[in-house]
Image: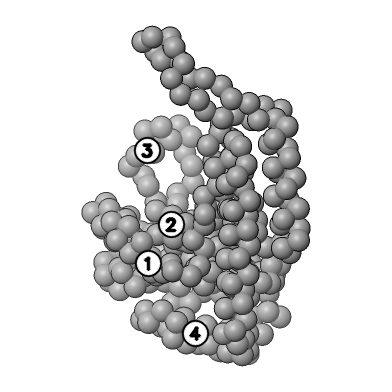
C-alpha cells in the first residue's frame, strides 16, 4: 500500500467518524468515497447506475428502465424540507419497484428553526441509498470542490450488482483530485466550532424572512417561505424566479425594493372568463414587460 492510499484511508476514517457521530447511521470507512464536490458525487452515482441513452428504444424503455430515484432534501431550489412520513412513502415506492435512491443532502445542516431534517438512510432497512454531500454549503467554501458519497447498502445489493466497484472505478478516473483540501478535511471536520454553523443558519433564516416579508406585499408575486437552504421561490404567474438570500442584508433590501418597483411598473390584472357563460368570474395577476 503506497503513501497516497494510506492518506486517503485516513481521510475516509475521519469523514466516517464525523458522519456516524452526526446521524447515528451505521457506516463503515469503506463505504466512503471522496469526490471533487457534491456535484461530482452526484455525477458518479448517476453514471454508475444509469445506462447510456439508446435513442431508438428511448420511448419504449422510459417507464421500465428507471435507474434510480433522485431526492434533493432539503430542496434546491425550493427550500422545502421533507417530512419523515413523506420520506417513508418514497422509500416504500422504491422498495416495491426495486429502485435505488440517490440522496442529495448537502443542505442537511441548513434547516431553519422549528423544522427537522431526517436522513433518508436512517429510515431505510431494505432500499440501497447513495447519499451525496460536501463541504461547500455547510462550511461556506464554494470552489473548494470537496464532496463525498456514502454508500448505505445493508443487504449488499450494490456489491452483487457491481455498483460499489463501479463507483470506485469512476473515482479513479479523476485525474485532478483535490488533494490539498482532502488533506485539510480531518481538521475542518474536527475543529470548526458549532457556533459557526448556528450563526450561518441564523443569518440565512433572517434573510429568508426579510425576502419573504418584502415580496409577499408585491403585486403579482407569491413567495413561498422556505424551511431551509439558501433560496426563496416566487410563483403565481406563468414564469417563476429563485432568489439567493446569502447576500448582505442591505443588498437584500435593495434587491427586494428593485423587484417591487419593477413589478409595480409592469403589473396588470386580467379577467378569467367562464367557459359556459363567457363572463368574467375571477381575476389573476400577470406581469408583462
**3 and 64: which is toward the camera:** 64
Q: Earlier in the sequence, mark 4 or mark 1?
A: 4
Q: Which residue is mark 4?
A: 18
The earlier-in-sequence mark between 2 and 4 is 4
Tag 3 residue: 61
Q: How is the image coloured?
A: one colour
Residue 277 showing in the rendered view: yes
Q: Position of residue 142 (x, y in %)?
A: 69, 67
Task: Using the image as rendered, state which of residue 91 and residue 246 is in the foreground.
Answer: 246
141 over 87 or under it: above or below: below
Residues marked 2 and 1 touching at CB (< 8 Å): yes
**Real-space Cα separation, disc 4 to disc 1, in angstroms:** 17 Å
Q: Report whether residue 146 is seen.
A: no
- Tell which of 57 and 126 is nearer to you: 126
Residue 39, image quadrant: bottom right
Residue at x-position 76% and y-position 58%: 251
Find the distance from the CA under tag 3 to the CA under tag 4: 41 Å
The tag earlier along the polypeptide, 2 or 3, is 3
Mark 3 neighbour density, 10 Å: few (under 14) some (14–19) many (20 or more): few
Q: What is the secondary structure assignment of the residue under circle 2?
A: strand
Amino acid at each position: 500500500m503506497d503513501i497516497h492510499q494510506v492518506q486517503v484511508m485516513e481521510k475516509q476514517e475521519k469523514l466516517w467518524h464525523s458522519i456516524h457521530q452526526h446521524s447515528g447511521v451505521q457506516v463503515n470507512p469503506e463505504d466512503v468515497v471522496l469526490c471533487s464536490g457534491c456535484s461530482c458525487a452526484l455525477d458518479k452515482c448517476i453514471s454508475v447506475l444509469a445506462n447510456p441513452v439508446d435513442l431508438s428504444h428511448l420511448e419504449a424503455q422510459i417507464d421500465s428502465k428507471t435507474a434510480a430515484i433522485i431526492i434533493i432534501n432539503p430542496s434546491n431550489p425550493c427550500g422545502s424540507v421533507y417530512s419523515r412520513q413523506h420520506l417513508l412513502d418514497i422509500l416504500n415506492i422504491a422498495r416495491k419497484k426495486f429502485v435505488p435512491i440517490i440522496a442529495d443532502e448537502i443542505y442537511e445542516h441548513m434547516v431553519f428553526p422549528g423544522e427537522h431534517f431526517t436522513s433518508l438512510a436512517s429510515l431505510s432497512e431494505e432500499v440501497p441509498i447513495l447519499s451525496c454531500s460536501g463541504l461547500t454549503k455547510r462550511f461556506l467554501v464554494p470552489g473548494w470542490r470537496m464532496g463525498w458519497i456514502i454508500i448505505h447498502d445493508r443487504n449488499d445489493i450494490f456489491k452483487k450488482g457491481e455498483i460499489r466497484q463501479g463507483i470506485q472505478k469512476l473515482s479513479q478516473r479523476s485525474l485532478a483530485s483535490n488533494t490539498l483540501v482532502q488533506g485539510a478535511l480531518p481538521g475542518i471536520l474536527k475543529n470548526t466550532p458549532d457556533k459557526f454553523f448556528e450563526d450561518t443558519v441564523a443569518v440565512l433564516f433572517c434573510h429568508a424572512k426579510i425576502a419573504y416579508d418584502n415580496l409577499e406585499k408585491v403585486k403579482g408575486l407569491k413567495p413561498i417561505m422556505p424551511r431551509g437552504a439558501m433560496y426563496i421561490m416566487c410563483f403565481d404567474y406563468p414564469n417563476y424566479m429563485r432568489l439567493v438570500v446569502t447576500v448582505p442584508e442591505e443588498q437584500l433590501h435593495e434587491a427586494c425594493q428593485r423587484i417591487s418597483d419593477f413589478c409595480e411598473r409592469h403589473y396588470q390584472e386580467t379577467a378569467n372568463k367562464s367557459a359556459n357563460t363567457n363572463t368574467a368570474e375571477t381575476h389573476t395577476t400577470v406581469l408583462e414587460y
